Image (cartoon, rainbow, N blue to C red):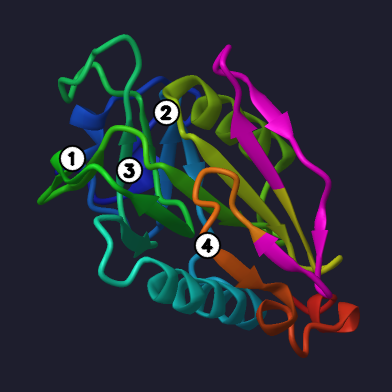
Amino acid sequence: MTTDISQLDLNGTYSYADYLNWNFKERIELIMGKIFKMSPAPAMKHQRIASRMASQLYTSFKNKPCEVFFAPFDVRLTFKDKKTDKDIETVVQPDICVICDETKLDKRGCLGSPDLVIEILSPGNSKKEMKQKFQVYEASGVREYWLVEPKDCCVFIYTLNEESKYIGHRPMTDDEIMYSHIFPEMKIDLAVIFEGMVEDEFDND
C-alpha cells in the first residue's frame, strides 16, 4: 500500500488497479492515466451550490429509478468495453452525478458512465483538468454534462448528439429555471442555487 503521493512519478501513467493500492491524505483523480490532485476541501460557496443543486435533484428524482450521488464517489469511466481494473485509466469524483442504470453501481462506486455529471468550477480547477474531463465525459458516453460557473452565476450545458459529440447550449443564468435536455421533466431554479453568491465572495477562496 502506497501512503505518500511523493513515492509516485507524477508524470507516469497509472490504472485503477494502481489506484486501489494508494492510501493518500490528498484526494486525487485519474484522468487517462494521469494523476490530478483535488482540493483538500471545497470552499464554502462550492459546498452551498452543490448542496442546493443536489437537494433539487433529489426532489426531481424522488420515486424514480435514477439515483443522485455526490463526491467523494468514485466513477470509473470505461472505453471500448475494457472494464478490468488494469484496463481502467480514468477514475473521477464528479461533484454530483445521476445514474439511472443500477447495474453500473457496485460497492466501489460506479462502473460506467453516469447519465448526468455536474462539475462546479473552483479556483483550484486547472484548465488542463477541465479540458480532459470534458473529453473523457464525452468519449465515455456521459449523456449530459453541466459545468457550473459560480463567479458568473451561470451553468453551461452539454448534451451528446447522434455522433456522440457534445453540443453546447446557451448558458443558463441565475434568473432562470433550467431544464435538462435528457430529463425534460426536471427543473432547477437557478435563483435558489445562486442566492447570495456575489463575486467578491470568491476572491478569497
Q: Report x, y in % for residue 191.
A: 75, 80
Q: CA distance from mark 3 to mark 1?
A: 13 Å
Residue named by callout 2: 9
10 Å crowding of disc 1: few (<14), some (14-19), many (20+): few
Q: Are marks 3 and 4 in contact (CB under 8 Å)?
A: no
Q: Which residues are magenta?
A: 157-178
Residue named by callout 4: 186
Q: CA distance from mark 4 to mark 2?
A: 44 Å
Residue 176 on the magenta segment: yes
> Mark 2 belongs to which amino acid?
Asp
Q: Report x, y in % for residue 18.
A: 23, 31
Foreground mark, 2 or 3, reads: 3
162 with respect to 54 (left or right):
right
10 Å crowding of disc 3: few (<14), some (14-19), many (20+): many
Q: Which quadrant of the rendered structure holds the N terminus? A: top left
10 Å crowding of disc 2: few (<14), some (14-19), many (20+): few
Foreground mark, 3 or 1, reads: 3
Residue named by callout 3: 75
